[in-house]
Image: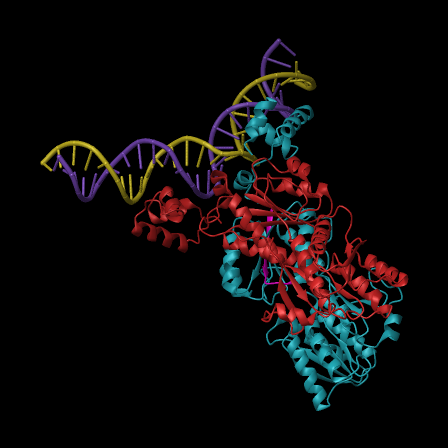
Chain colours: A red, B cyan, C yellow, D purple
Amino acid sequence: MAVTIKDVAREANVSVASVSRALNGSANVMEVTRQRILGVAEKLRYVPHSAARSLITRRTQTVGALLPDLFGEFFSELIRGIDLAARARGLHLLVSSSHGNPSEAAKALRSMQGRVDGVLVMSPHVDARFLTEHLSEGLPAVLINTVAHTNKYPTLNIDNYGGALSMTRHLLAGGYESIAFVGGPDGNFDASERLRGFNDAIAESETPVRSRVLCGDFTEESGYRLAKKLHAAGTLPRAVFAANDTMAIGMLLALNESGVRVPDDVALAGFDDIPIARFVNPPLTTVRVRIADLGRCALEELAVELDIATPGEAIDDKPSCYIVVRASCGSANQSAAVSGDVGSSASKKEIEIPGRRV
Amino acid sequence: MAVTIKDVAREANVSVASVSRALNGSANVMEVTRQRILGVAEKLRYVPHSAARSLITRRTQTVGALLPDLFGEFFSELIRGIDLAARARGLHLLVSSSHGNPSEAAKALRSMQGRVDGVLVMSPHVDARFLTEHLSEGLPAVLINTVAHTNKYPTLNIDNYGGALSMTRHLLAGGYESIAFVGGPDGNFDASERLRGFNDAIAESETPVRSRVLCGDFTEESGYRLAKKLHAAGTLPRAVFAANDTMAIGMLLALNESGVRVPDDVALAGFDDIPIARFVNPPLTTVRVRIADLGRCALEELAVELDIATPGEAIDDKPSCYIVVRASCGSANQSAAVSGDVGSSASKKEIEIPGRRV
DNA sequence: ATCGCCCATGCAAACGTTTACATTCCGCCG
DNA sequence: CGGCGGAATGTAAACGTTTGCATGGGCGAT
């Protein structure tokens, strides 16, 4: 680390300016000189001092990712997507995760100030006030899956609406005459969007269908309780679409216990495609979110904000959802019709149906 | 970001030096002056320019994490552990993951040069040569779960040996008279350590036991094939300890298909406690690694290298393994004896046994 | 052949800190 | 009463780059 641009300059018999020029832009420097400089730099294992560079260029070549307390696959995939996209653009990735409360997140956000050129923010605690409060004026940011309605920053969301719409249509196409939707916690953005998708799909249905909406809270227990209650009351619908897999699995447990057959008596579908979904019995039909895609798109969007996106290439659309049809809803007949060519990654008993893009 | 230390100095009617002193160390500055300066800094929302600071202090307050292509929970947990520990120390975390090959990892490592004070390296491609080649001389580093034998850098490993030893002892205590170990790929460090643990446990056994070692490659398919082969040959042992859960689950699939009862006919154990392990039928007995702990320990170790560890506090021991007893090996009787007090996080049907610390 | 222009290169300022050293001021002791 | 020491504060150098501007030399045009 002791070797600086001056050392290279001296060794190559040029000025520091020429070294800088040779290494960076191709601003006028004779090819032979450039080669000599590059050679010396290589030989000396010169690596530019990024802090010094940042000081003058006011760029850090780094983006920050502010994430909530995420577990398992979701976190991994999100970071993977972000990381790969960042690397492709030559950007570094500064991560700050596991923020359980707003003040922690705020502190982390502030401490990133000046270390990053832009920031990806995903946090349940983010609202407009939080942002104006803690996000410094000039810092480009992209919001991920957040409820904050602001046109100040681009926002990327999982296509909750589209996914729920597609899944509900799928169930409707299965011919179930009564369908229940199990919602998530009040005020949860994902949950309300999924409900909206469900309602719209029901509304557009041409064949009459009895639908109802039940209140869950995204926990397995709430699913379990609801299923037990419905069974006890004898009011089980023919199909249930739970707003997340966790609740669906809770219901599945209860139904199995009660001797209700899935999908023969009740078809069941979830949302998220959590890893366990394919291992429950029967495997759960669900909506899969392409999480790595979400991360990648977010970073690309941020690149646009940073004015480093290549103008030519089109920035990807919002990350989409896929319906993954497994045994928990008995529509093997028509799903086969939808998708003859099954993706190679899908197991033999799985069928993927691209979700509607919104 | 336009507000610099000069602005604060001017506004507070002091020199930049005093501002610097007031904000950093408590080097002689009158309390009243300090308060005034702090007030002004707050009012102006001054945040020090980290690049400028790094330039002169030659510290970045950032550590890098170089990780291979990790999936799911392992990655999440590792980062979580690192992130939390780093935050506790006021360090930032620069992540570069998903490196599939040595040259990518090397590039990433070099590009971190100068942006970090130290680096956590976890990569299957890391050996001594790789390190001397690509890790700049003065950069502190801690190796995670790597085979590189070097006393130049501290190395943290999962306690593969101890975990396998404990699990094998557990099986031996279950009274199985024949036990097979299914190994991992040749040259894989984890795999060979686990095998070593198995062998040592067998060797120390007082009651005679027939043991054999089979060759797997960590894939589900290899487990599946092996189990089918053993069953066809009629050479199934009473207990099988697979070097990872993935293979164990492959075997479980095959055994279930063949009508072999687990654990009644064959007891089965794995290693890793991947999320699915508890959802297969029967749930898999396995060795759990405290991955977040691994990350935390690695960062603490790095802090020591960086001379920023508080001298008083003892650095934690190496991260340990836990045996998680589930239904796939039928030793409910004696495992209950081992652990009467089950951790609150364990489900009703799970028993945790602390692994041997090495 | 002379003049001007452009290209390659060098010089030096600037970026925002920290910190060694200089200065000032005050109180205390001789 | 004068000098001295120490605490509070100021001054300026240094960190390693990038980049606007200056310089010089070669070459084409007149």
Outermost residue, bottom side: B233
Query: Which residue is situated farthest in the front direction here?
Result: A207
Nearer to the camera, B172 or A351 = A351
Image quadrant occupied by the N terminus of chain B: top right
Left or right position of D10 against B253: left
Residue B250 locus on image (x, y percent): 69, 76
Look at the picture and state if A194 lies above or below B100. above
| Residue at 35% from the left image edge and 42% from the top image edge | A15
Is residue B192 placed above or below B178 in the rendered structure?
above
Secondary structure mostly seen in the magenta stretch: strand
Span shown in magenta? B61-71
Q: Where's residue B73, x and y in %?
A: 69, 61
Rendered-image quadrant of the C terminus of chain B: bottom right
Q: Nearer the viewer, residue A218 or A198?
A: A198
Residue A86 at x, y = what percent?
54, 52
Residue drawn at (57%, 29%) of the image: B17
Q: Is residue D17 above or below residue B326?
A: above
Query: Does residue D15 appear to the left or right of B42 in the view shown?
Result: left
